Image: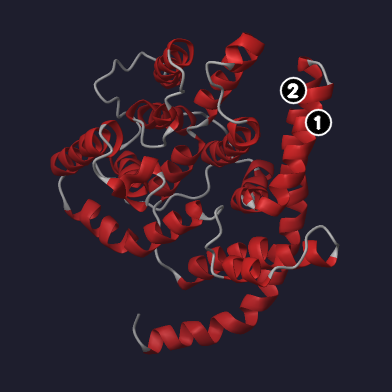
Amino acid sequence: MKMESRLSRQSNLELLRIISILFVLIVHFDFGTFGVPVHADLLNSKSTAIVKCLIECFAIIGVNAFVLISGYFGVKIKINSVMNLLFQCFFYSVILYIVLWILGFVDFNAKRMLQKFLFVTESNWFISCYLGLLVFSPMVNNFIDSVKRRKLELFIISIFLFQSYFGYLRFACAGFWHGYSILSFIIIYCIGRYIRLYGSDVRFFLNKKISDFLVYVFFISLNFFAVLFFLFYTNQPLMKLYDYNNPLLIIASVYFFLFFLKLKIPQNKCINMVAISTLAVLLFHSQAEIGVYYKSILHYAFDNYATFQFFLVAIGLLLLIYIVVFLIDQIRIWMQKKLFEYILPPINNLMSKLKL
């Protein structure tokens, strides 16, 4: 039976939204800072290389989980939501760059400024895919809402298998591009919509008594053991195992999502408020000008502190970034509110006249 009622903010999924973004930060703290361990690293510190891979495997599902949340609640083109997304991108790219330049943290570069203004920097792949998802959402939603359950299941399974073989195993279809693509986002979005429409009892052929979290751990473990095999017995790590369109990681992210979906958490204003700034955290820390500083801190801690102390520094830095961005985001929210009071009414009037 389809669930037609509009869902309000659910603290269990808002908590998942926070954890998903923290997972993204962890991935950037891990391989994004120290690189991918290779066979030669085992000679220096076998345990360090294994722990790095383990952390990466468990945290790499952050982006997929974030898209599943979007699919569950549904993405719809509304002028307010589009303007909100664009202003956040503008604030944490252009305005942030100008502030860093004024404070003397970066040298002004006109080309770099233009790239940030057009959202074409190397760190904006997620926003590009998400904007694409926003553009195609009316067609995707209309298709999902108009077909019967069995046809939707057949579509999701078919396109999932197609991506798994041609887009992942063979990489014969470049449009999937390791999961960094609008096509991969749409597949995961459709899975999220399916769960929303037909309930959280979807087990994908598994026994209902098996915990969703254990299934997540199982598929991540399978991927981790594959990572260890290539790490120990080849000269090159198999980077495909960390791709967002890795079938094992997609399945793991679905069950991680289902675990939080079924988690009984009463409405929590604190969680819901903190979750509002998750996209801001992603945009802020992804800027190359910011990455230079947190990566240098991590490298210094890794080179000069014991393992336990390093992890304390890394966790502290992780939380510090979130707290700082949350506070900065209050300024962004205030500016956005004041700005939108002037620009949204005429835009909405124009849209209504054009019947868009």
The figure's colour scheme reads secondary structure
Quadrant location, the N terminus: top left
Image-quadrant location for residue 257:
top left
| Mark 1 neighbour density, 10 Å: few (under 14) some (14–19) many (20 or more) | few
Please state the horizontal and vertical placement of residue 39, each as a whole percent of the image.
52, 16
Disc 2 designates what residue?
311
Residue 87 in view: no
Which element is circle 2 on?
helix
* Of labels 2 and 1, the one closer to you: 1
Residue 153 in view: yes
Disc 1 designates what residue?
300
Three-letter code, disc 1 = Tyr
Above or below, 63 against 337 in this view is: above
Quadrant location, the C terminus: bottom left
Image-quadrant location for residue 106:
bottom right
Above or below, 301 against 354 in this view is: above
At 65% across and 41% down in the image, what residue appears? Answer: 271
Above or below, 97 against 219 in this view is: below
Which residue occupies the foreground of this view, 342 or 58?
Answer: 58
Image-quadrant location for residue 334:
bottom right
Task: Tell me which numbered mark, 2 or 1, is placed earlier along the sequence.
Answer: 1
Gap in Å between the C-alphas at discs 2 and 1? Answer: 12 Å
Which residue occupies the foreground of this view, 162 or 106?
Answer: 106
| Mark 2 neighbour density, 10 Å: few (under 14) some (14–19) many (20 or more) | some
At 62% across and 69% down in the image, what residue appears? Answer: 111
Please state the horizontal and vertical placement of residue 342, each as a whole percent of the image.
63, 83
In the image, is 152 to the left or to the right of 122?
A: left
Which element is circle 1 on?
helix
At 60% across and 17% down in the image, what residue appears? Answer: 41
Which residue occupies the foreground of this view, 313 or 352?
Answer: 313
Three-letter code, disc 2 = Phe
Above or below, 277 against 31 in this view is: below
